[in-house]
Amino acid sequence: MSETKTDFLHQPAVRAVLPFVNGGISGMVATTIVQPIDMVKVRIQLAGEGTAGGPKPTALGVTRQIITSGKFLDLYTGLSAGLLRQAIYTTARLGFFEKFMIAINERAKVNGTTVGFAERAAAGLGAGGIAAFIGNPCDLALIRMQSDGLKPPAERANYKNVIDALVRISKSEGVTALWAGCFPTVVRAMALNFGQLAFFSEAKAQFEARTNWSLKTRTLAASAVAGFFASFFSLPFDFVKTRLQKQTKGPQGQLQYTGMFDCFRKVAKQEGLGRFYRGFGTYYVRIAPHAMITLLVLDYLGFLTK
């Protein structure tokens, strides 16, 4: 008979919050590493806004432009917002996903059934949607900070950090402005989590059943698969989210886009459908490593705290 563990890590209250803590730490580690790629991705998405032709920036070109016009550390603009976003968003999405999967696995065990892809997908969609709504203000602050450098010097907000951005946006535009772009943010998160968590869980199960690979190899391969599907399903919504969160009211109080569907319609008409997938390579290079690092760190933390 196995001995019941009674140390700090195995206290009921600690076990209840560990999935959330491990998820947040994993996301923050990954964000610190891939933040420069995220900065480049945002600049690519905002290039040529409102025109069918316009500039077609490359990741290398944007990176060179940022470095030559300022300094290398400009690639880390908005890192404080990215870290706070991960502390809230990833903590919630990975924590809720694990909680949902525990409940699903327990129900399957009671019913004598196996957990299928549909259950994993539902858990990923639900966890992503809830977390995205909670973390939207940080997401908006991140986009504002990253896009600020595109404005003429006299029009830049020059936010000091994420707290400064959140306070100033709230004062000038109202607290509800912090949830601008919330709808596409939630849909993007649901699409991303559907691709990332559901396919990661499914791929791990398939690799375990069909290969003799080691656990580390299966985890790496599954996270790469998850990164591709997460990128494919979520990029159009990420593109619209970026456009909506970047916009501010004009002199007459008007906005360029009134919402997600209006943004989809105008971009498709003015810039072409292909614009939604511009920068897919950069986005995948941002999403896949982030997914791989997050999931690997999460697995490692889970091993350390089991």
Image (cartoon, rainbow, N blue to C red):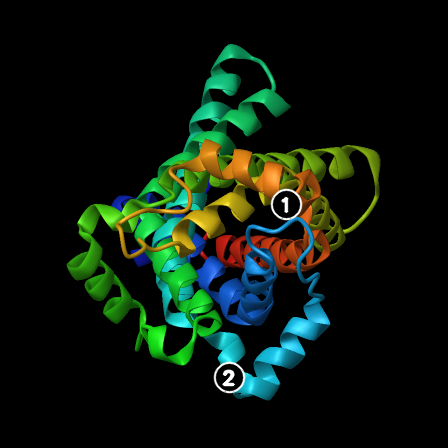
Residue 101 in sight from this viewpoint: no
Q: Nearer the viewer, residue 281 or 27?
A: 281
Q: In front of the other: label 1 or label 2?
A: 1
**At 72% across and 44% down in the image, what residue appears?**
225
Q: Residue furthest top?
A: 111
In the rendered view, does 16 fall on the left or right side of 264? left
Mark 2 is surrounded, within 10 Å at the Cα level, by few (under 14), some (14 to 19) or many (20 or more) other residues, namely: few
Q: Residue at x 56, y 13 (%)?
A: 112
Q: Is 195 placed above or below 243 here? A: above
Q: CA distance from mark 1 to mark 2?
A: 32 Å
The amino acid pointed to by label 2 is: Leu
Secondary structure under the numbered disc 1 in the rendered image: loop
Residue at which label 1 appears: 271
Using the rendered view, name the quadrant where residue 43 is placed: bottom right
Which residue has dot 2 on it? 73
Q: Amino acid at mark 1?
A: Glu
